[in-house]
Structure formats: structure tokens, C-alpha cells
Image (cartoon, rainbow, N blue to C red):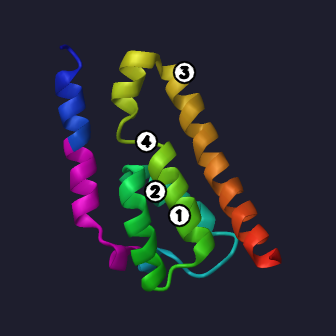
Amino acid sequence: MQFLPVLVAVLLLISLANSLLGPEDFRHFFTGNTFTDPLVGAILGSIAAGNPITSYIIGGELKSVGVSLIAVTAFILSWVTVGVAQSPMEAATLGRRFTIARNLTSFLSAIIIAVMTVTTIRLL
């Protein structure tokens, strides 16, 4: 019961971030650069945070406004696996060290997997 206020605050923060930025707003952050777009995508996905079901819709919307596949892939992966907004709740329940390690690993993995996925698709 002691985690309820933190949980409510985290959910409100995520909802606020998601409602302030729409897919059209995200295209201004991406330049089409193969090296910076995955990093920017992973950063934005880490901040926004969401669930896997809505990631398909968001990914399609981002592609429709001209965001590159590598950026969309990094965004979606970090959207689902990295949770900056949820970090206080996770740290309170699982420990600060674990939370930092998990988020850093997920962030770096999102970038690496995005690059590998798009490279594989281009080779096919």
C-alpha cells in the first residue's frame, strides 16, 4: 500500500508525456542520420514509455510521417523495455542498482537490435 502514491504519480507522468507529444511532433527530432536516429529514438522511447500493443500503432504513425525504420525500431524497443518514468517505483521495489543496470542494458540493447534489424532487412 505504501507504493500506491508512487505508482499513481508514475502513471500520471507517463500519460502526460504521451499526451503532449504526438507522432507528428516526433519527426522533428529525427534527421534521417543512420547514426544519430537510433540514439534519439531510444532516448525518446525511454522517456515516453508504453505498452507493446500500442507500439504497433505508434510505429506505423511514425513511419507515415517520415521517420526512418531504424529510428522507429529503436523507439519501439526502448518504449517497451526502458522505463525512465517508472524508475522510482522499480527502484523502490527492486533496488536502485538493479533498476539502473536493467535500464542501461535495455537502452543499449534497443540501439544495437535496431541497427541489426534494419541491416538484416536491407540485406534481404
What's the residue at 51%, 79% (across, down)? 67
Q: Dot 1, how many residues are within 10 Å of its Cα: few (below 14), some (14-19), or many (20+)? A: many
Which of the two discs, 3 and 2, labels the residue nearer the N terminus? Answer: 2
Contact (Cβ within 8 Å) of mark 4 with mark 1: no
What's the residue at 40%, 73% (across, down)? 26
Helix, strand or loop under label 1? helix
Locate the C terminus by quadrant: bottom right
Question: Whole-Å distance between the Cαs marked 3 and 1?
Answer: 25 Å
Amino acid type assigned to the residue bearing label 1 in the image: Gly
Q: Mark 1 points at which residue?
A: 41
Disc on res. 97? 3
Q: Is residue 2 left or right of residue 23?
A: left
Q: Toward the viewer: 51 or 97?
A: 51
Whole-percent x and y of residue 42?
54, 57
Q: In this view, does 60 lie above or below 4?
A: below
Question: Whole-Å distance between the Cαs marked 2 and 1?
Answer: 6 Å
Helix, strand or loop under label 4? loop
Contact (Cβ within 8 Å) of mark 2 with mark 1: yes
Question: Whole-Å distance between the Cαs marked 3 and 2?
Answer: 21 Å
Q: Does the segment drawn in magenta span residue 65?
A: no
Which of the two discs, 3 and 1, labels the residue nearer the N terminus? Answer: 1
Q: Is residue 39 left or right of residue 85?
A: right
Disc on res. 45? 2
Amino acid type assigned to the residue bearing label 2 in the image: Gly
Q: Dot 2, how many residues are within 10 Å of its Cα: few (below 14), some (14-19), or many (20+)? A: many
